[in-house]
């Protein structure tokens, strides 16, 4: 911004200096005809000058008028050139801004995940129109209060750094392993499986994870159990729950997701979504795994286990604006603290 202002200041200065020069030239010319020429070598010019206002002296032969007409002519010329230059400068700046915006919007898409089959003894009939089963878990107030002070301290020290070039930051796996939920209530289990598969390359059995998570058909999966299970089966990062509340700011959410991905781990979010707010289906409680994020924090790439469950390809993985995911948060999200 400072460089732009300096450029325009220099341009105006360069424009004014020739005008001053031309005005000075015209004044000197007038003075010359007024004082020097009229009193020295050319007496006939003296007569003309004295009778400049006479009707028989044509205005175009009056040296004073000629000098002022020349100044006016030069000023008009310079004004036109300055106007042309100014328009060209504005157009160049507009094109540069547009080019920058195009560059930001033309970021290549995130890597495409690969769906993998997991042996499961749990199967049910997909009910696509109903959305996933909503969990009935009620977050104890003491858990929110315990996380509140820590979240406030983190939020106070956040400084999001946006690089010049925008790119997708992945959690490290190439490609990311996508796992679909096998029942209407095991989205939390599927997201836990995805996180562990992409960290370790292997998975505990479904029965072990079901038992450790305490997943049930009536209540779904307790968010507090997911980080416990993740930490028990991997050592790359220490997972924790960030319980949703007024202490969780948008910047804190973005920073937590970014730090988790740069730690080569997958964050998991718990959301309440609806078609009216731009999502594909309705659910008052659902888990999603995040496997990539734009470096300007504007979008996240999501693996949705419900998409594979109902067999809709466009629901398996997609990207969403980060602010929309933040707005949909219900209980909170599971992220890496270290």
Image (tube, rainbow, N blue to C red):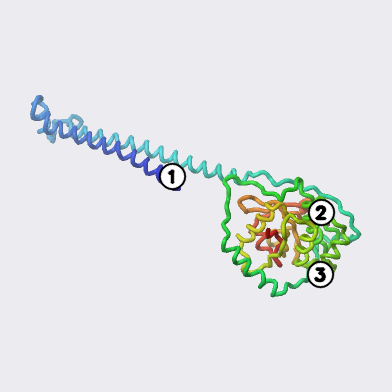
Is tag 2's residue or tag 1's residue first in the polypeptide sequence?
A: 1
Question: Does residue 273 appear in this view?
Answer: no
Which one is in front, 57 or 201?
201
Is tag 2's residue or tag 3's residue first in the polypeptide sequence?
A: 2
Tell me what residue is drawn at x 75 percent, y 63 percent.
227
Q: Residues within 10 Å of mark 1 (few under 14, many from 20)?
A: few
Q: Which residue is mark 2?
A: 179
Q: Residues within 10 Å of mark 2 (few under 14, many from 20)?
A: many
Q: Which mark is residue 219?
A: 3
Tell me what residue is drawn at x 82 percent, y 62 percent.
186
Which one is in front, 326 or 261?
261
Mark 2 falls on what kind of element? loop
Tell me what residue is drawn at x 64 percent, y 44 percent.
107
Residue 293, percent from left and from top = 67, 52
Q: Quadrant of the C terminus?
A: bottom right
Residue 97, percent from left and from top = 52, 44
């Amino acid at each position: 911004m400072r460089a732009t202002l300096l450029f325009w200041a220099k341009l105006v200065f360069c424009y004014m200096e020739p005008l001053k020069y031309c005005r000075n030239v015209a004044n000197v010319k007038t003075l010359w005809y007024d004082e020097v020429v009229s009193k020295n070598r050319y007496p006939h010019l003296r007569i003309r000058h004295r009778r400049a206002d006479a009707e028989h002296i044509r205005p175009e032969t009056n040296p004073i008028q000629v000098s002022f007409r020349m100044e006016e002519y030069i000023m008009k010329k310079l004004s036109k050139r300055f106007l042309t230059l100014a328009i060209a400068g504005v157009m160049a700046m507009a094109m540069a801004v547009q080019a920058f915006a195009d560059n930001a919007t033309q970021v290549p898409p995130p890597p495409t995940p690969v769906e993998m089959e997991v042996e499961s003894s749990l199967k049910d009939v997909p009910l696509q129109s109903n959305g996933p089963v909503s969990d009935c878990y009620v977050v104890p107030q003491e858990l929110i209060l315990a996380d509140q002070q820590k979240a406030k301290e983190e939020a106070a020290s956040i400084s999001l750094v946006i690089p010049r070039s925008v790119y997708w930051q992945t959690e490290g796996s190439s490609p990311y392993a996508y796992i679909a939920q096998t029942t209407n209530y095991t989205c939390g289990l599927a997201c836990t499986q995805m996180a562990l598969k992409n960290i370790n390359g292997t998975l505990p059995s479904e029965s072990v994870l079901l038992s450790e998570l305490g997943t049930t058909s009536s209540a779904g999966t307790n968010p507090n159990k997911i980080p416990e299970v993740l930490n028990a089966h991997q050592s790359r990062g220490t997972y924790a729950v960030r319980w949703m509340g007024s202490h969780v700011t948008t910047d804190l959410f973005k920073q937590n997701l970014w730090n988790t991905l740069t730690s080569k781990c997958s964050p998991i979010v718990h959301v309440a979504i609806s078609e009216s707010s731009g999502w594909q289906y309705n659910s008052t409680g659902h888990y999603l795994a995040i496997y990539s994020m734009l470096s300007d924090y504007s979008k996240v790439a999501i693996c949705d286990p419900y998409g594979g469950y109902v067999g809709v390809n466009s629901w398996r993985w997609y990207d969403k604006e980060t602010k929309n995911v933040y707005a949909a948060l219900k209980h909170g999200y599971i992220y890496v603290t270290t």
